[in-house]
Image: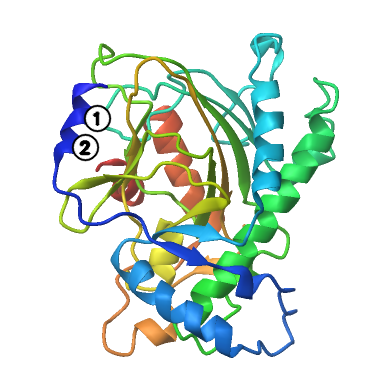
Amino acid sequence: ISSLALESLNRTMEGPVPDVDFSAFCVEIPGPMEVTTVTTRQREVGKQLYEILTNHGFVYAFGLLSSQEIAEVFRGSKGFFSPSTDRSALPRLTPATNVGYGAVGNEALNARRAGDIKEAFNLRKETLTDGTLNFQEGFPSYCHRAWDLCAMAAQRALLAFGVALGLHEPAIFARSLRTFDLCTLRLLRYPQSDAGNGSALPCGEHTDFGSVTVLLVEDGVPGLEVRTPTGGWISAPGKEGAVLLNTGAMLARWCNEHVKATPHRVVTFPGRERYSVAFFCDPDKETVVEALPEFTRDTPAKFPPIKAEDYLQQCLKAAMHGELSEEAKKSLEI
């Protein structure tokens, strides 16, 4: 194990990332004109989630995807990253599209470090039907399936968050996903590496940019670490039957930082490669993200309103091109 991994594992842990059963939220999301009816069981789950959201925002979510569905997503992802895939023929990942293949070092999610030791393939909803994915037989149908599973999980998680926070309209976050035109499904492979890569990590310390991230990690696979409120790091390996949810910077802005966007990283574990699949859930492009009234009654808004697309573009340009705006620094200079 790398010195960085040993250092973090030897610290006093502040408790593991908690488990929560989200099955009470496996319901259809109400339409824009419908009233959200909250059940007793959903309120009970919301009480569990409230402390999580306001302290660190990381949770193992059971009941959103089954073990079989998670395994199905990983089979397709590993098939994509096989040696038979011609990386040189894939579309290149850029901030402008946030679609395509990024080789090792293509981005640095911590602006203070060298490029991340990972390879990634990003897709968005329009790429499911525009021919971008036709370079590999069976890949478009796999991506459709993985997208549908993760998008459903994200929307249900956001409904749960609205209930947990006691919002007047609990579905307000979930309803920001009418077109899903800013969401990204990312397939990730972390190759075997050692501690001799200078400042580079498989994934540098950062906070996610959007509302919520749905992260699939195989059971028992280590590497992901979450920063605790007091500055330590705790390990968050995959768990059978669970996805990891974590809150992002746009949700924190919506909630006037009442909800936390927590830094996390992936550290090196020599001798093994690592796979994960992340669904980055961002509000639709034209959504204006500004502090909700529930969070400005006693505290003035800490951030000016900003369109979701504008905010995300600032963060992507910083990660891939090193163009650090003041907003992006909050997520990438950890």
Give the side of residue 188 with respect to residue 129, left or right: left
Residue 269 visible in the picture: yes
Q: Quadrant of the C terminus?
A: top left
* Residue 290, percent from left and from top: 45, 72
**Dot 1: what SS?**
helix
70 to 56, vertically: above or below:
above
Label 2 sits on what residue type? Leu
**Dot 2: what SS?**
helix
Q: Are marks 2 and 1 in contact (CB under 8 Å)?
A: yes
* Residue 193, percent from left and from top: 37, 14
Residue 173 visible in the picture: no
* Residue 37, percent from left and from top: 65, 90
Give the side of residue 205 with respect to residue 96, left or right: left
Label 1 sits on what residue type? Ala
Q: Quadrant of the N terminus?
A: top left
Residue found at x 63% / y 64%: 155
* Residue 64, percent from left and from top: 62, 60
Q: Nearer the viewer, residue 46 or 113?
A: 46
200 to 162, vertically: above or below:
above
| Residue located beneath label 1 in the image | 5
Residue found at x 70% / y 10%: 86
Q: CA distance from mark 2 to mark 1?
A: 6 Å
Q: Nearer the viewer, residue 309 or 248?
A: 248
Residue found at x 29% / y 71%: 302
Q: Quadrant of residue 38?
A: bottom right
Give the side of residue 72 with respect to residue 208, left or right: right
On residue 9, the disc is 2
84 to 190, vertically: above or below:
above
Mark 2: give few (<14), some (14-19) or many (20+) Cα within 10 Å: some
